[in-house]
Amino acid sequence: MAAATETEQFPCVLTVQVPFPTTRLASVALQSLQVDKELSPLVRRTFGISPPASDANTTGDQDKTLHVEYRATTNRMLRVAVNSFMESLNLVIEVMEHLDADVLAAEAHSI
Amino acid sequence: MAPLYALGCEGSANKLGIGVISHDPETNKTKILSNIRHTFVSPPGTGFLPKDTAAHHRAHFVSVAREALRVAGLASPGTSPASATRGARAWAPPHQRRRRRAHPMGRVITGADNPVVLYVSGGNTQVIAYAEQRYRIFGETLDIAVGNCIDRFARTLAIPNDPFPGYNREPVLLDLPYAVKGMDCSFSGILGAADLLAAQMRKQDALLASGGSLKEGEERITPEDLCFTLQETVFAMLVEITERAMAHVGSKQVLVVGGVGCNERLQEMMGLMARDRGGSVYATDERFCIDNGIMIGLAGLLAWETGFRTPFEDSTCTQRFRTDEVHIKWRTD
């Protein structure tokens, strides 16, 4: 019998789109969040960066939205995985806000 | 050549430590510019759970990192070419850095030349000596770490685990097993036996509270005696395996590192042993013994100077990273 397709095995899907101000920040977030493997065999995830769907044609070729798609066997596993992702995302954004090179440089000048 | 700077982040247990360190490859001078730590303290009688600890580290990461930069006077990371280069990893979230066995930091702090190293913490108990670009493990615990044994017994007694409770009267040494096998040792049976004594103590408490009296000849057990006994027993074991390794290697120096290493009684016992052998003990205090960022920074910096790089996508953590896996390329002796 053919193996069940991914959609059948992992029916619960959630796609998170996180718009960033610049391509660089979107890429930093992608690399930071991607590096830790998804530990549960009951969850699959894919990362990508693309222009926001709504204004893909108006902003040109600037890729600055982080796309994360989570697929899980149950809604419970989906919730756990996405919650954990949100906690990491929160920290990444906080680090960008307070510890990015340009933020620190600007603060150093203002002192 | 200007000194290189590194920002080290440590968060593999309940301490979040971030520090800035500099090292001049030409003069081999090391300078600690900042060493900030924030500890997640769980209530007495409880341990720190991974979930709560992670939440603590996330909540404090930014403020601790900013404080480390402020104290180091590196408010603007662009002032040093090296820090900018290191920055790519330095600014990464804490779950991204690789946990490195960094306790040989002790050599820099204490000036010990080529010691036998006793590495005693909540996660590790190892007797280590350096040979041919690796820290070789001569002996280690066969089950739990000595710090874990102590912490868990503190939990049994529902007392805070920092610092070890002192004693202000002559304590009684109770009976506990002693488990040394060659240069290895074992603590889980000792913990079990200590827990049994603690249970017996509670029974005595209940009996006396209800107006009863102890059996003829039965010794009244106190928390002080229990702590004293556990400490003396496990430390004696550590001294024994360290002495055996020193005799084996032919070293007269012993360096005690790791969180348990800042216990002054352990340092005292180790000092007595080392003096008997015509040597000396090197130890540091809680700034460097307990988990901190600069030990990570220094190990990273020394490795960086030898050309070691970790690609971003490989900068993960592992719980199975042993002391002797690291190639100590920066030592040539």
Image (tube, helix red, strand yellow):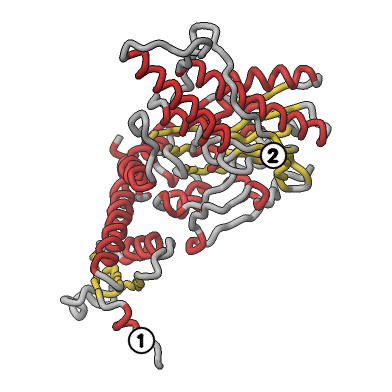
Q: Nearer the viewer, residue B240 or B106?
A: B240
State the residue at coordinates (49%, 57%).
Answer: B316
Q: How many marks?
A: 2
- Measured along the vertical axis of the image, is residue B202 above or below residue B126? above
Task: Give coordinates of residue B205: x percent, y percent.
Answer: 38, 17
The N terminus of chain B lies in quadrant: top right
To which chain does the residue with label 1 belong?
A
Residue A72: % across, % down: 30, 72
Q: Is residue B318 placed above or below B114 in the rendered structure?
A: below
Judged left or right of residue A32, residue B173 is right
| Label 2: how many Cα within 10 Å (few below 14, some 14–19, many 20+) | many
Q: Quadrant of residue B276?
A: top right
Residue located at (28% from left, 53% from top): A90
Say which amino acid is labelled 1: Ala
Residue B27: percent from left, percent from top: 68, 36
Q: Which residue is the site of mark 2?
A: B184
Query: Is residue B226 among what the camera can see?
Result: yes
Residue type, label 2: Asp
Q: Residue extending furthest bottom?
A: A1
In the image, farthest residue toward the front: B216
Q: Which mark is residue A4?
A: 1
Query: Please, which chain is the residue tagged with disc 2 on?
Result: B
